[in-house]
Image (tube, rainbow, N blue to C red):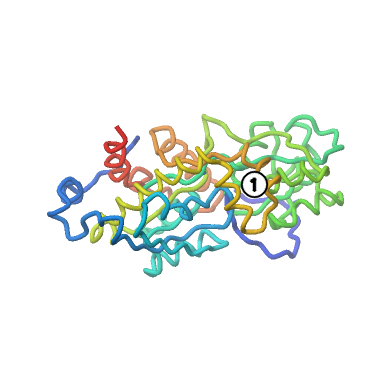
């Protein structure tokens, strides 16, 4: 889908934070047997005291889970967390062998799969985190009221897809009924505050920042069960790591699940960690209401991913829809769930 003549391109630096949330793929029997009998596998699951791994993520509240892996694994585990600002860079570092696992947005994973890149999503990272924001004093009361308005977006992101879904459901043509303006996520708040735009759709904490500072209000949350739902980001590994060191992958998935549970049960510790990277804790507390820290992947998650891939194809973000079922390797989640029972 092409953005029409009304799209205005502002010369601002774009940083793709991206969303910045069963249908199992076939698993080789050898890999399953290795995990069932660790002694038979060269990559058997390492003991916590021997656990060493390098994991990539962002320094945002919704993507901090890897920073809690060491606590989840216990004494002796050494997890080096490397922060990035771009999910594409994280994926590139993973493929280069600089990372054992990394977070990435689901659109980035879909794009990688469409290009035949050997990565697999093994566990989810975060859901939700997005919102459609309008001016605090705006007369816009529904999505239909956006007709004739100027809306900021970042092309090629989850938020781009969500925005077009919102407009379509409101009966609005993005080429004719609104003006779409390309503005970096960091600058959307200022543009809304000074009246350059009428609305923006982005990830947290920017929507909550607009509300907290008094220049914006949430018009709606773009989550539709019959479309993309609330999916946002997940954790990926390479096929090579799965084949050669399945025990490491299993340990990281186990750590991710436990870390997520720790963060959800102790939100203060989670938000204190997020605040240590420079974001006001009061703002984080507000944005946390629109953040879901997660780990599970079910049939609905897979279907929402398929819906997202189809929309990405229609937008020209990918040239072909990949095999979404094969994009996931849920065998490690299945193994971890057995330990939770």
Between 270 and 161, the residue placed more toward the observer is 270
Q: Nearer the viewer, residue 329 or 172?
A: 329
Residue 171 locus on image (x, y percent): 69, 32
Give the quarter of the image for residue 210: top right
Residue 55 at x, y percent in the picture? 43, 60
Q: In the displayed structure, would residue 313 be above or below residue 13? A: above
Looking at the image, which residue is at 40% across and 61% down? 79
The residue indicated by pointer 1 is: 204
Judge whether residue 309 can be spotted in this image.
yes
Q: Which secondary structure lies at badge 1?
A: loop
Quadrant containing the C terminus in the rendered view? top left
Nearer to us in this view, 273 or 139 = 273
Q: Is residue 6 left or right of residue 38?
A: right
Residue 319 appearing in the image: no
x and y percentages locating residue 25 in the rendered image: 30, 43
Where residue 78 sits in the image (x, y, percent)? Answer: 38, 62
Q: Residue at x 66, y 58 (%)?
A: 278
């Amino acid at each position: 889908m092409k953005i029409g003549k009304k799209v205005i391109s502002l010369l601002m630096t774009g940083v793709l934070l991206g969303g910045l949330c069963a249908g199992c793929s076939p698993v080789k029997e050898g890999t399953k047997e290795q995990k069932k009998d660790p002694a038979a596998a060269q990559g058997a699951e390492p003991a916590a005291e021997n656990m060493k791994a390098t994991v990539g993520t962002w320094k945002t509240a919704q993507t901090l889970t890897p920073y809690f892996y060491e606590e989840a694994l216990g004494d002796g585990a050494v997890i080096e967390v490397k922060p990035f600002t771009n999910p594409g860079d994280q994926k590139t570092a993973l493929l280069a062998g600089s990372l054992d696992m990394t977070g990435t947005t689901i659109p980035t994973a879909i794009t990688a799969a469409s290009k035949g890149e050997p990565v697999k999503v093994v566990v989810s990272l975060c859901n939700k985190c997005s919102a459609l924001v309008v001016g605090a004093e705006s007369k816009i009361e529904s999505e239909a009221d956006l007709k004739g308005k100027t809306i900021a977006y970042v092309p090629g992101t989850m938020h781009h897809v969500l925005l077009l879904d919102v407009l379509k459901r409101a009966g609005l043509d993005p080429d004719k009924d609104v003006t779409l303006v390309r503005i970096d996520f960091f600058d959307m708040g200022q543009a809304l505050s000074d009246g350059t735009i009428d609305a923006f759709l982005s990830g947290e904490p920017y929507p909550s920042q607009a509300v907290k500072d008094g220049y914006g209000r949430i018009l709606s949350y773009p989550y539709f069960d019959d479309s993309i739902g609330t999916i946002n980001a997940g954790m990926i590994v390479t096929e090579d790591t799965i084949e050669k060191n399945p025990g490491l992958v299993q340990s990281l998935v186990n750590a991710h699940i436990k870390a997520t549970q720790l963060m959800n049960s102790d939100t203060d510790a989670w938000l204190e960690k997020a605040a240590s990277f420079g974001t006001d804790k009061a703002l984080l507390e507000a944005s946390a209401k629109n953040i879901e820290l997660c780990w599970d992947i079910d049939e609905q998650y897979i279907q929402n991913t398929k819906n997202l891939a189809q929309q990405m194809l229609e937008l020209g973000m990918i040239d072909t829809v990949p095999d979404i079922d094969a994009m996931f390797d849920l065998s490690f989640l299945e193994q971890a769930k057995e330990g939770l029972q």
